[in-house]
């Protein structure tokens, strides 16, 4: 085929050298990227493929809808809480169960804590190493590192002695020969641009962020009663509140609430004095690397999250609004109706599934079907169990292709912030505009790999500050005498409709998440989910639209094709998570081949 | 059966504390024998109780999010499904430096890459457990979404527990048999996910 243009307007050329990066994730899940390079090592075609999605109906059909959250939180190693929350929302929607104000606040706090933690972990422990050369930090001058740190932040850990200690710790670790989290990186690549001092500063904060994780998860334990898998409840939250020191043993009391308040203060301090200054310092040096836009700024989708008022998912209530932007027109934000069968649909023409009648049509999740059909296209290279190169003209991914009104969409923190910005939200506008001003960049600079990474950081500070606001308003409500955390009026199945459908939507840290359910005779009849990475890592669709990862890689030059660091940068900027099917198996039970070019 | 757990939340493990021992089951209960680690700690917790400074935890597939716990324990005992190349159900006890090597050798699941990284990050931050033990089982079947442990693996849980109790005794952990089963609020996981309800409620194949 050589040169073509995708339906969504991207030039493709698959004639050059094919490079395969597999696996691409540093955490759970499996994702493989294949690209074609031209003579100048610039990406001219990109193919994204992910692991198998079995459909939740396989594990949930016939089960009690009130238990579904506990199953859905096991489908992914990193999105546990958000699956549980969205599952509860789907069941509450289907059964018409309003939740109390405190339950809404606690859910918001749990999710805001999740955002803060996830974004921090993503930046320091999963993505920073795409920008920070750890081995270069060994060459840094601790005194100059201290001067650099003090020029950008008031954070107390900034003395020359502190950075010298960190450097010695790193040295011992590297000399021990077990690089651990720093293995499998492309150290020394010419694509790394930070001076050694900035690298050492980032390594120090990598370690501090590991410590901070310990604090932030306590919020989940306090309200969820258990960690790392907190409890959730259809109808509210499964914790009682007692601020008078009498009443139920084990209730959330003032001591614990004060601890939550302290942790919120620590989170704000760490994000504002460490994460954000680091982000700006790194962005200032890499700002000339403007690649990775793809669908960013063109087609972006968010369902919205954090209802200020319990049970109200309208944009008047949502602290981060929902909506869709199409064809780069930021002056119009479309409302998204997740119930409309014409809006959200999934296609399988390029996915290893079959629809009834071998159809190229799309199915709304309420009508979703998950029937595997694994076959390689005529132009694929290798064998079924040892794929050397995929044929993207045929079926090539275990992910379905979700579309909004036929459009491939990008989801995630950048989409949420662009939609909030386009809807005129002042808090988001202020964060975005001041950051761009500091870096002397135009708004369009957001539509890039760095923009995605920056939006995640800004959303992290937004979340930390929002926790304070939500906590204070919850405390005011509790002090006014409302301690209800759950609505059990419709707990018993005899109070339910015989046949009902529901949808739960929300925003996982990595993007829009929806669960669509059908309850019949008090049992789950169907259960479908579309997870954020299915949107972003989507394969092509029958109309010829390429997905967000595929589009974002086009036009990116690689400094060295043997060390495709730039591919990792862009893909990691989406915070990929394909753990929702945790195993990498072909239908006959064989592990799929791993082809590495490293 | 759905449960509400209302008003019965245990004190929780959120205080800053140093554990004497962390007993951690890892893996994914939704993928047949991948659930070995989680099911074994579930059974351990049902039958035995330990002093307050011992934490028995269902770690699922949480990877790096388990780091805070791994960093705050003196001794770490892990249950997991490991591909040793043995007959299904065979158990192996691995200790100390060999543990991270085995977890990364031939991966049964991506969660092990994650856990190997947890151990390395613990080492980097200078909070590595003094004693490590891994009780691994050779899985029979993994590729069965929504399935439970296969008989060859399930039958080995008592033996895995006996191995664990020996290790714990050696580490100076006081072990008591429970007189009655712990309540729902004190279980290692939600009621709906316990092995009995999980197996009984499985949808029919091919639905």
Image: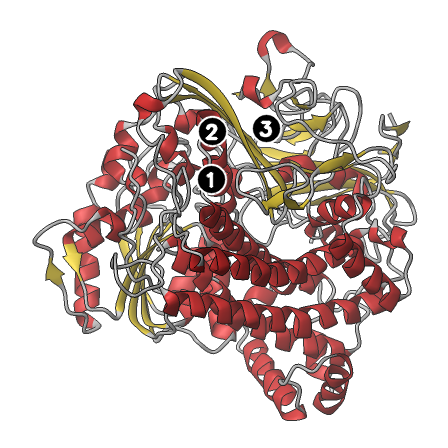
Rounded to the nearest whole Å, what is the CA distance between mark 2 and mark 1? Answer: 9 Å
Q: Earlier in the sequence, mark 2 or mark 3?
A: 2
Of the 4 image quadrants, the one containing the N terminus of chain A is top right
Comparing A342 with B71, the one in front is A342
Instruction: Answer left or right for A362 relative to B176.
Output: right
Residue B151: x, y in percent?
Answer: 23, 35
Tell me the tag on residue A56. 2
- In the depicted structure, whether residue A457 falls above or below residue A108: below
Tell me the tag on residue B118. none
Residue appearing at x 53%, y 42% in the figure: A310
Residue appearing at x 75%, y 46% in the figure: A420
Residue labelled with disc 1: A75
Residue B100: x, y in percent?
Answer: 43, 63
Rounded to the nearest whole Å, what is the CA distance between mark 2 and mark 3? Answer: 26 Å
How dense is the environment of label 2, judged by Cα within 10 Å: few (below 14), some, or many (20 and up)? Answer: many
Please report, as a chain letter, where disc 1 is located. Answer: A
How dense is the environment of label 3, judged by Cα within 10 Å: few (below 14), some, or many (20 and up)? Answer: some
Residue labelled with disc 3: A384
Q: Are marks 2 and 1 in contact (CB under 8 Å)?
A: yes
Of the 4 image quadrants, the one containing the C terminus of chain A is bottom right
Residue A134: x, y in percent?
Answer: 67, 72
């Amino acid at each position: 085929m050589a040169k073509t243009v995708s339906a969504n307007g991207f030039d493709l050329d698959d004639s050059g050298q094919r490079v395969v990066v597999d696996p691409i994730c540093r955490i759970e899940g499996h994702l493989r990227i294949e690209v074609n390079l031209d003579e100048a090592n610039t990406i001219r075609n990109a193919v994204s493929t992910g692991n198998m999605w079995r459909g939740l109906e396989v594990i949930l059909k016939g089960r009690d809808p009130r238990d579904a959250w506990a199953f859905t939180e096991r489908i992914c190693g990193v999105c546990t809480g958000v699956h549980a929350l969205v599952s509860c929302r789907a069941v509450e929607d289907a059964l018409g169960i309003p939740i109390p104000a405190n339950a809404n606040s606690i859910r918001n706090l749990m999710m805001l804590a999740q955002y803060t933690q996830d974004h921090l972990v993503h930046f320091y422990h999963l993505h920073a190493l795409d920008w920070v050369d750890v081995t270069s930090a060994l060459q840094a001058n601790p005194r100059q590192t201290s001067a650099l740190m003090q020029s950008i932040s008031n954070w107390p850990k900034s003395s020359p002695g502190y950075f010298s200690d960190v450097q010695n710790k790193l040295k011992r670790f590297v000399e021990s020969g077990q690089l651990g989290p720093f293995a499998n990186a492309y150290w020394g690549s010419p694509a790394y641009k930070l001076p050694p001092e900035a690298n050492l500063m980032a390594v120090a904060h990598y370690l501090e962020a590991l410590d901070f994780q310990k604090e932030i998860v306590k919020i989940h334990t306090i309200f969820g009663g258990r960690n790392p898998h907190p409890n959730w409840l259809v109808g509210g939250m499964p914790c009682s509140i007692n601020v008078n020191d009498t009443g139920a043993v084990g209730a959330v009391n003032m001591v614990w609430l004060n601890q939550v308040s302290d942790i919120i203060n620590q989170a704000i301090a760490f994000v504002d004095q460490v994460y954000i200054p680091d982000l700006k310092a790194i962005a200032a040096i890499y700002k000339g690397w403007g690649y990775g836009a793809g669908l960013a700024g063109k087609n972006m989708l968010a369902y919205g999250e954090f209802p200020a008022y319990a049970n109200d998912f309208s944009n008047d209530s949502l602290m981060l609004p929902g909506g869709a932007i199409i064809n780069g027109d930021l002056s119009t934000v479309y409302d998204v109706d997740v119930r409309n069968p014409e809006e959200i649909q999934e296609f399988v023409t390029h996915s290893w599934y079959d629809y009834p009648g071998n159809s190229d049509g799309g199915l709304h999740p309420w009508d979703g079907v998950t029937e595997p059909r694994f076959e390689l296209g005529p132009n694929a290279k290798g064998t079924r169990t040892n794929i050397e190169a995929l044929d993207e003209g045929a079926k090539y991914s275990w992910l379905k292709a979700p579309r909004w009104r036929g459009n491939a969409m990008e989801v995630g923190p950048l989409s949420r912030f662009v939609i909030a910005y386009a809807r005129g939200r002042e808090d988001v506008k202020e964060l975005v505009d001041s950051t761009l001003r500091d870096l002397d960049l135009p708004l369009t600079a957001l539509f890039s790999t760095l923009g995605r990474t920056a939006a995640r950081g800004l959303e992290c500070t937004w979340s930390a500050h929002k926790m304070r606001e939500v906590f204070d308003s919850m405390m005011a409500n509790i002090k006014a005498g409302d301690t209800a955390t759950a609505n059990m009026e419709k707990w018993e199945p005899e109070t339910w409709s015989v046949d009902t459908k529901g949808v739960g939507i929300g925003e996982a840290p990595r993007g829009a998440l929806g669960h669509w359910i059908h309850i019949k005779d008090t049992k789950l009849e169907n259960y479908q989910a579309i997870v954020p990475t299915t949107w972003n890592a989507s394969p092509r669709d029958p109309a010829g639209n390429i997905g967000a990862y595929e589009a974002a890689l086009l036009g990116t030059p690689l400094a060295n094709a043997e060390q495709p660091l730039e591919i990792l940068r862009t893909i990691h900027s989406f915070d990929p998570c394909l753990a929702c099917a945790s195993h990498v198996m072909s239908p006959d039970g064989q592990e799929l081949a791993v082809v590495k070019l490293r | 059966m759905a449960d509400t757990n209302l008003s019965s939340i245990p004190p929780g493990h959120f205080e800053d504390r140093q554990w004497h021992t962390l007993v951690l089951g890892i893996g994914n209960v939704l993928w047949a024998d991948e659930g070995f680690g989680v099911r074994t700690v579930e059974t351990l917790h049902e039958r035995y109780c330990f002093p307050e400074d011992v934490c028995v935890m269902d770690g699922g597939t949480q990877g790096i999010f388990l780091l805070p716990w791994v960093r705050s324990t003196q001794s770490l005992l892990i249950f997991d499904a490991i591909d040793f190349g043995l007959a299904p159900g065979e158990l192996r006890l691995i200790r100390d430096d060999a543990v991270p090597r085995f977890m990364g050798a031939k991966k049964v699941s991506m969660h092990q890459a994650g856990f190997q990284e947890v151990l390395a990050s613990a080492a980097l931050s200078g909070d590595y457990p003094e004693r490590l033990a891994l009780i691994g089982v050779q899985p029979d079947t993994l590729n069965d979404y929504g399935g439970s442990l296969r008989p060859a693996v399930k039958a080995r849980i008592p033996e895995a527990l006996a191995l664990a109790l020996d290790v714990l005794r050696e580490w100076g952990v006081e072990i008591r048999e429970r007189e009655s089963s712990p309540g729902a609020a004190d279980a290692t996981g939600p009621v709906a996910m316990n092995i009995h309800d999980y197996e009984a409620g499985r949808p029919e194949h091919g639905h």
